[in-house]
Amino acid sequence: MSQNTEWMQRDLAVLWHPCTQMKDHERLPLIPIKRGDGVWLEDFDGKRYLDAVSSWWVNVFGHGNSRINARIKEQLESLEHVMLAGFTHAPVVELSERLVQITPAGLNKVFYADNGSSGIEVALKMSHHYWINSGQPGKKRFITLTNSYHGETVAAMSVGDVALFTDTYKALLLDTIKVPSPDCYLRPEGMGWEEHSRNMFAAMEQTLAEHAHEVAAVIVEPLIQGAGGMRMYHPVYLTLLREACDRYGVHLIHDEIAVGFGRTGTMFACEQAGITPDFLVLSKALTGGYLPMAAVLTTDQVYGAFYDDYATLRAFLHSHTYTGNPLACAAALATLDIFEQDNVIEQNKALAARMARATAHLAEHPHVAEVRQTGMALAIEIVADKASKTAYPWQERRGLQVYQHALERGALLRPLGSVVYFLPPYVITPEQIDFLAEVASEGIDIATRQPTRVSVASDLYPNHRDPG
Ligand SMILES: Cc1ncc(COP(=O)(O)O)c(C=O)c1O
């Protein structure tokens, strides 16, 4: 028995994997990974896979990065963890100072959680609590965009809109207000991204006008709706949204969990709109993809609304056990050093251009409706009919065929439904980008070769996608 098979069998006897129909593993082998090195993951039988999706969008500087490893080891020698209520430590102070320094002006206070969804819960609770402390307890609803994704905990799901992840739990969710997304895939033919995003703002303006009195915050994934299929929009939408939130007295929450740290071409997506949100939620690449941690940055004004004598009961009494873990902070500090010392944002421009060049030919593919890109994220939308952009029935799982082909060829490309995407670590080389493009092209040819087999248009799950 190969080592891979042995680990797979032991795994399936005791584990329940995330975002997985476990029965799939009757025919799809699990891949036990023995080691990581740069963009490569290696299994127990010695086969290597190029991690084109940065292991769920977290890994920016490669697996086993020597600089991040060294910083974590150094931290391990002095302090592995201490609770953050009543205590503090050097890495968390230094990290907070640096986050305040590199994020847009006005975000001066940092609250930590230990994963992205928990960070979203913090921002939602803090926003509503701010309004309670400010004498407006009626502001308790949230406005969110259609096709959004903000995580898997119950409030985070409530502000999401990817049916596959939320529909089953409808009965548990908060009552949120959904506004049509500025998603530029859906723009009328011939219209530019900016004009479409600007036009789509009318619905948000109207919703704010109607509901501002009962709304605590608008929450968005800036520029890229990730789990919703890497759908993208123009920064003008965020500029208009900031101005309107100010006008209507509503907070703006930027979920930059997936897009922060250079993914959109700037360190943070909000820079492209020239704005400061009231809450900026960061996670994933924050620790270089090493350890779970989230940071919620906010303003002095928000912080001030909680700052009072204990007996007024205005404090934010929210906690996660591992808040501000020193090892995670050390990984984050090493990650920020690399961004600074290696001029990463500038260097990425050439890589982003290479991704565009390597995939440009796919725009002509008879089953590709769009190749779109924002910075270091590139997505290829496969469709049953190009002219009408008719999607393949989700039951056919076309993206899964791309995934399987890529594995055979030594790449980890894990499409979101019929959207094949590259979200690679920034240490990828131009030649490796060309390899990914070649593998994706082959995979798309294979996946689109067969005519459509399932005739059911999915009205049960209109925006159902295979999980990423
Ligand atoms: C935009 C966005 N928000 C929130 C989350 C949830 O983060 P976590 O999986 O760490 O809970 C994700 C995860 O993919 C995300 O992409």
Image (cartoon, rainbow, N blue to C red):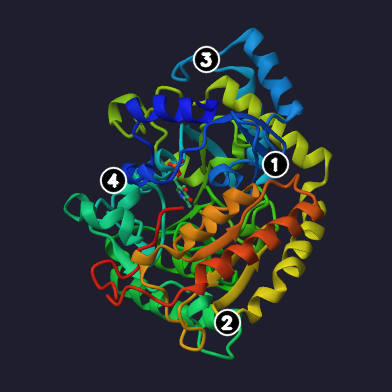
Disc 1 versus disc 3: distance between alpha carbons? 29 Å
Q: Earlier in the sequence, mark 2 or mark 4?
A: 4
Q: According to the image, label 3 marks what residue?
A: 81
Contact? badges 1 and 2 (CB < 8 Å): no
Rate crowding at label 4 as few (under 14), some (14 to 19) or many (20 or more) other CA atoms within 10 Å: some
Q: According to the image, label 4 marks what residue?
A: 154
Foreground residue, 324 or 45? Answer: 45
- The number of discs equals 4
Disc 2 versus disc 4: distance between alpha carbons? 40 Å
The residue depicted at 73 percent of the width and 47 percent of the height is 426
Q: According to the image, label 1 marks what residue?
A: 39
Rate crowding at label 2 as few (under 14), some (14 to 19) or many (20 or more) other CA atoms within 10 Å: some
User: Residue most toward the front?
Assistant: 1
Residue 368 percent coordinates (x, y):
56, 76
Foreground residue, 357 or 87? Answer: 357
Disc 2 versus disc 3: distance between alpha carbons? 54 Å
Q: Give the image quarter of residue 47.
A: top right
Which label sits in the foreground, 1 or 4? Answer: 1
Contact? badges 1 and 4 (CB < 8 Å): no
Q: According to the image, label 2 marks what residue?
A: 366
Tell me which amino acid carries mark 1: Val
User: Residue most toward the top?
Assistant: 77
